[in-house]
Image (cartoon, grey):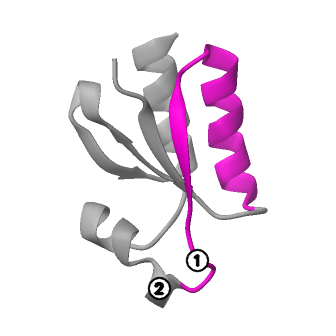
Amino acid sequence: MAPIQLYELQGCPFCAKVKGKLDELGVEYDSHMVPASHAERTEVKEISGQTEVPMIVDPDHGVEGMAESDDIVAYLEETYA
């Protein structure tokens, strides 16, 4: 099983919410810190078409570029709980 890829920003409360859910569920993930400037978040933009974080990629379930912390948490609960 490939780990989820989490794109996050240091100090972001929405990112912390997603990380907390991943940890709670024991889901393996790799963290990728993104620049503070939206203009410099080229990798996030290439994957998801937008620059907001948190954003996840879950290769085992075909999820490419899911954003919005509430949506991610709901997805994680539905898929991994």
Q: Is residue 47 magenta?
A: no
Q: Residues within 10 Å of mark 1 (few under 14, many from 20)?
A: few
Q: Furthest-top residue in view?
A: 81
Q: Furthest-left residue in view?
A: 62
Q: Where is 32 relative to 62, above or below?
A: below
Residue named by callout 1: 35
Q: Where is 17 relative to 41, above or below?
A: above
Left or right relative to 73: residue 58 = left
* Element marked by disc 1: loop
Write down the quadrant of residue 24 in the picture. Answer: top right
Query: 51 or 5: which is nearer to us?
Result: 5
Residue 11: horizontal and vertical position, in percent?
78, 62
Span highlighted in magenta in the image: 12-37
| Kind of residue at badge 2 | Glu
Q: Which mark is residue 40?
A: 2
Residue 35: horizontal and vertical position, in percent?
58, 77
